[in-house]
Amino acid sequence: IFEVPAAGMAAKNRTDEQVEKLFSCLRPTGESVDHGHLFAGNSLFHSLILEASGNELMRVVASPIFVVLRTQFLRDKADPSFWDEVDCDHLDIAEAIKKRNSALAEKLMRKHLENLRSVYENLSMNQLKT
């Protein structure tokens, strides 16, 4: 919800240092990392976008949502191929932000969140079954 406009705002308002931070939390292609670490890096990526948007309220409001996601979902429950897809999405979003292309950053973030939603829903349904 917050992250689509935040990605567009980040593309407009970001600093070079914020772009460097975004790219620094991306996993190098092909690198194997434990899922807990991947989730932390991905959570940081989303937090950095909210920070780069320049809208402090968005960052504050989204923080509890990230806590719920961290404790209730993903971590080691998501398929490894899921993390590869997340990495590709994040790279594309970071590139759009770097290029200050707010429309593309929003479009890519929307697509990314739609992909995440289906994974969250499947994990949630699986948790209810167990």
Image (cartoon, rainbow, N blue to C red):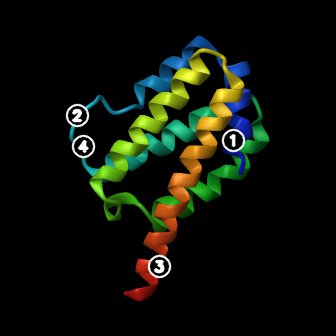
Q: CA distance from mark 1 to mark 3?
A: 25 Å
For marks 4 and 3 on the same chain, the one whose residue lies earlier in the sequence: 4
Horizontal placement of 98 versus 3: left or right? left
Q: Residues within 10 Å of mark 4 (few under 14, many from 20)?
A: few
Q: CA distance from mark 2 to mark 1?
A: 28 Å
Residue contact between numbered discs 1 and 3, judged by CB atoms under 8 Å = no
The numbered mark at residue 88 is: none
Q: Amino acid at mark 3?
A: Met
Q: Which residue is mark 2?
A: 30
Q: Which residue is mark 3?
A: 125
Spot the residue most to the top. 16
For marks 4 and 1 on the same chain, the one whose residue lies earlier in the sequence: 1
Q: Amino acid at mark 4?
A: Val
Q: CA distance from mark 4 to mark 3?
A: 26 Å
Q: CA distance from mark 4 to mark 2?
A: 9 Å
Q: Amino acid at mark 1?
A: Val
Q: Position of residue 93 (x, y in %)?
A: 54, 30
Q: Amino acid at mark 2?
A: Gly
Residue contact between numbered discs 4 and 2, judged by CB atoms under 8 Å = no
Q: Position of residue 92 (x, y in %)?
A: 49, 29
Q: Residues within 10 Å of mark 2 (few under 14, many from 20)?
A: few
Is residue 102 shown above or below 64?
Answer: above
* Residue 24 figure quarter: top left
* SS type, badge 1: helix
* SS type, badge 4: loop
Q: Which residue is mark 1?
A: 4
Q: Nearer the viewer, residue 11 or 33?
A: 11
Q: Position of residue 17 (x, y in %)?
A: 55, 15
